[in-house]
Image (spheres, grey):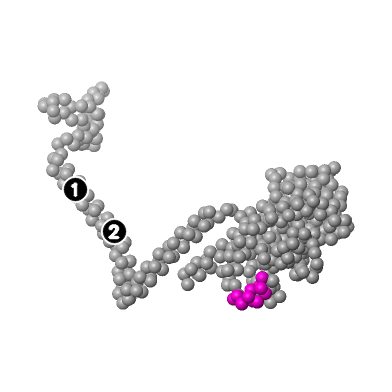
Amino acid sequence: MGANASNYPHSCSPRVGGNSQAQQTFIGTSSYSQQGYGCESKLYSLDHGHEKPQDKKKRTSGLATLKKKFIKRRKSNRSADHAKQMRELLSGWDVRDVNALVEEYEGTSALKELSLQASLARPEARTLQKDMADLYEYKYCTDVDLIFQETCFPVHRAILAARCPFFKTLLSSSPEYGAEIIMDINTAGIDMPMFSALLHYLYTGEFGMEDSRFQNVDILVQLSEEFGTPNSLDVDMRGLFDYMCYYDVVLSFSSDSELVEAFGGNQNCLDEELKAHKAVISARSPFFRNLLQRRIRTGEEITDRTLRTPTRIILDESIIPKKYAKVILHCMYTDVVDLSVLHCSPSVGSLSEVQALVAGKPNMTRAEEAMELYHIALFLEFNMLAQGMKFCECLLAQVVCS
């Protein structure tokens, strides 16, 4: 049978009739009875126009009051305990002690802000890995050439010998400076880019290029069998520092400025010499790199190569005291600042210390030594050492607060 849509109470339609100002729109929902299509309608008004303004204002003000009470109670709970604890702590204190505590808090806050600003202003220090990558790319102070597939790869004898047993054996057969060694690799599939990536890995611990062949386990196993498996970069560099194999430069110290400028003179004027590698000190310090490059330009390096003697660098001890030399070199090879060598042996004393004792000056404190080493690092442009002396700020803070 037919059904009129207007008979269904859930239909949405305006009701018109009676007073025009009282017209409303209703949305109906129905609950059907079990007899036929009878239904009971429930109508919900969308018009709140007949709500009394006093009731609406009362409800709004009640919610606002409840919210204010809740916020006030929460703030009170948050601060009351701290205030109570401070009152109980300071109840028996003298006024001078309270003032001292306030000054302590203010000083600590100022030092914290100073440390934060210093950290933000401090330039990022270059790590050993980054400097070794530049050393391989820019070829500072190379001393041997590897020839592979008619391509020359200038490298550093000491680095490869320390990192790879294969190259240690190979290079020992050609000890002369600038030797050209033709590479014969048995591992199949090694081309020039892959050989360069292999050398890059020995310098940095990373291949330095994306090549799916380095994901091939068979190739890696073959390379390991032929070249050996190197240790981590820091372990091998620490071994190079400890044993100084293939060292090619010595650092000497003198108080005679004219002797320093001439890079020569009476050996009796020189203190104990320290061995090092040109590759490492030129990679870590622009000061040493520029000094060595100047010797090459002036032809002084040719004499050392002809005589097969290590290059001698004489440093003015009034600028770089000898007692800091081992700390500096150790950091260049390992990226670690170890100040224990400053006081581990009485033989570490330098000319500046002797002059200080003769003049009646007291021994330097740890904070003073740290600050002096920090300025030496800036002079050498060795940022890793300068940043490694960050703890110097803490020592200075202790001096200021004491």
Q: Position of residue 89 (x, y in %)?
A: 33, 73
What's the residue at 48%, 68% (across, down)?
Answer: 400
Q: Is residue 56 visible?
A: yes
Residue 113 left/right relative to 256: left
User: Is 342 inside the magenta-drawn segment?
Assistant: no
Q: Which residue is mark 2?
A: 74
First-in-chain label (2 vs 1): 1
What's the residue at 68%, 60% (across, down)?
Answer: 332
Q: Position of residue 311 (x, y in %)?
A: 80, 59
**Secondary structure beneath disc 1?**
helix
Q: Is residue 164 visible?
A: no
Q: Is residue 32 above or below residue 203?
A: above
Q: Which residues are magenta?
A: 352-362
- Which of the 4 quarters of the picture holds residue 82? bottom left
What's the residue at 44%, 65% (across, down)?
Answer: 108
Query: What kind of residue is marked 2?
Result: Arg
Q: Position of residue 375 (x, y in %)?
A: 61, 61
Residue nearest the viewer, comparing 69 with 290: 290
Q: Which residue is mark 1?
A: 61
User: Is 359 inside the magenta-drawn segment?
Assistant: yes
Residue nearest the viewer, comparing 378 with 8: 378
Label tally:
2
**Secondary structure beneath disc 2?**
helix
